[in-house]
Image (cartoon, helix red, strand yellow):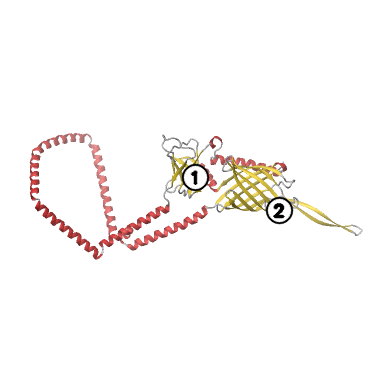
Amino acid sequence: MTPAAKIGLFMLVGLIILGVFIVKIQDIPIGERGERIVVKARFPSVAGIDRKADVRIAGVRVGKVTDIRLVGGEAVLTLSLDPDVQLHQGASVRVSSLGMLGDKFVQVLPGPPGAPPLAPGTELHGTAPPTFDEVLKAATDIGADVKQVTLALRESIGGQQGADKLNEIIGNIQELTASLKVLIRNNQGNIDATTANFRDFSAEMKEQLPLIAEKLNRLADSLQGVVGDNREDLHASLANIRDISERLKTSADNINAISTKIASGQGSIGKLVNDDTTVDNFNKTLNSIESGVETLKDTVGRYERYRLDMLVAAESLPSVNESRSTIGFDLWTNDKRFFRLQYVDSPFGRTKTSNETVTTTYGDGHTETYTRESTKTDFRNTFNAQIGYRLLPETFIRAGLFESEGGAAIDQQVEVAGHPVVLSLAAFDFNRNEAGSPHLRLEGRVFLNQNMFLSAGWDDPTYSKHSSFLVGAGLTWTDEDMKYLLGLAGKGF
């Protein structure tokens, strides 16, 4: 076996070990565990939710978000749930977070236990919590309402107009007292009758009071016995009541002191209530904060749109007893454009042919000249540096360096038996003198899941010296997968 084949075999074994490591840490479902429940959920907004986000029921993690798409102005999430999860009619979803500043996750309410099971293909409708901008707007509206109330009170009480209103209120009170005097005078007879009734009632109470007093004495004797039996508990209760009353008195004094300062315009709240300038400055500050939040949100959102896809792959070329390995990444700046940078351990070197003129001088003085052709093969490490563009939703084109030579390629994504498949045709190294034709490569990749794929195809079919079918495997993951993987590793340590 050649050194290149040994290196390729070593890389393939390393990829298999790395794949097992990722499957174990990332909890990728395989076999019986792969029979997961897939549910669609539609949200008006899923701010803070990304792929790989947790799905929880009653706080317990039962799955994750595998896909997020924008459909009709709303976000449609694909939820992958554990096989033992049971959803019933009436189930719903919502976006929640672990505490005020914790990570966001999708909360599933499975529905009433006695309801029929949820029909396959049913799309759940979810709700999202209010955003920070909505809370800030509500606070601004409340501040505006408070300002209007204070202005209304100031206009009603202040100035000559306020004094006239107070005089009017005092006049109304005087009229009310005069009316009461007339009412009492006109109903003097009724008042006398009521007084006589009270007199009769007091006389009756005079007769009944001794009986009531006797009953109260007997009750007091009973209470005295109860108190005697529970004297220690009663003392403890009275001490607690005394302590509570002292605390209430202290709190009341503090509240009176605070309200007095506010009424006199002392402190920030007092100035806010009594000074229009402070209110205006406060509103300006809130507007500045809102503008800063919008700017920060736009800046952060611009970088959140970038995505990094990483790849490690190895291929075997049995027909020529060689192998090829690749490692690198794709940087997506938006949904239509990406930049690819990869290191490639190319199985074939670069062959160069040159002509050398040789002159030989013999002993008798004559010379002979002839041209000698030399061939040299340079074995080197190569690179892929390409820019890609999405022509159609499932069609991409690439151009740039392919194994350090100029070229272009086209990729087509299809789905076969429920698995994503990527078909690629690449052409590069158009100036090969020894082959007389560019290097062509036809390759297909079948993704077993979101991260693992198998590859097969034909490499360099027009050059018989290098032509070979290829088979291989690889791993690919996004920056979100890496964050999820590092988070699990961090919890493990």
Outermost residue to the right? 364
What residue do we see at 56% from left, 47% from top?
478
Q: Is 448 left or right of 116, judged from the image as shown?
A: right
Which numbered disc covers residue 430?
2
CB contact under 8 Å: marks 2 and 1: no
Q: Is 259 above or below relative to 122?
A: below
Whether residue 159 appears in this view of the structure is yes
Other-residue count near label 2 (Cα within 10 Å), few / some / many at <14 / 14–19 / ≥20: some
Q: Is 370 left or right of 285, judged from the image as shown?
A: right
- Residue type (three-letter) at the residue carrying disc 1: Leu
Q: Residue 492 or 135: which is nearer the viewer?
A: 135
Whether residue 95 appears in this view of the structure is no
Residue that carries the numbered disc 1 in the rendered image: 77
What residue do we see at 22% from left, 61% from top?
165
Which numbered disc covers residue 382?
none
What residue do we see at 44% from left, 59% from top?
291
What element does badge 2 sit on? loop
What element does badge 1 sit on? strand
